[in-house]
Amino acid sequence: MKVRKNITLSQRANEFLRMLAREKKKSQSEVIEELIQKELKEYESKKKLKIFEELLKGIDSYSGKIGDKTVQQIKEEMGNEI
């Protein structure tokens, strides 16, 4: 579904948009959508990286033990059950 938007651009942005559309042989709307998708991917990547970095901060305090047993000991005890 498409939605109609009425936007205002600076003269410079308008000229750049027209140039991009002409060079890519696409409509200005398609160029804008592509730019938004690119920004969205970057935003999502940065968001995921931030979450990952937060997880890494907690690793320093993780001892690798659950109770008084290591994860490896628990795996060995469970054998093929996991």
Image (cartoon, rainbow, N blue to C red):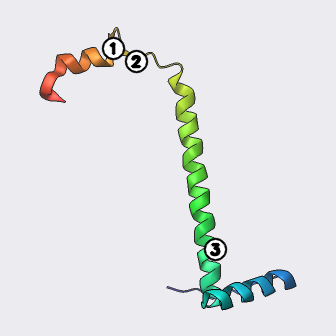
Residue ID at (53%, 26%) = 58
| Picture disc at residue 12 | none
How far is the residue under mark 1 from the one under mark 2? 6 Å
How far is the residue under mark 1 from the one under mark 3? 48 Å
| Picture disc at residue 64 | 2
- Note whether 17 is above or below 43 in the view shown: below
How far is the residue under mark 3 from the one under mark 2? 44 Å
**Kind of element beneath mark 1:** strand
Name the residue beneath numbered marker 3. 35
Looking at the picture, which amino acid does disc 2 mark? Gly
Residue ID at (56%, 56%) = 44
Q: Do the CB atoms of the residues marked 1 and 2 lie less than 8 Å apart?
A: yes
Upstream in sequence: badge 1 or badge 3: 3
Would you identify the image quadrant in which residue 29 lies? bottom right
**Kind of element beneath mark 3:** helix
- Note whether 60 is above or below 48 in the view shown: above
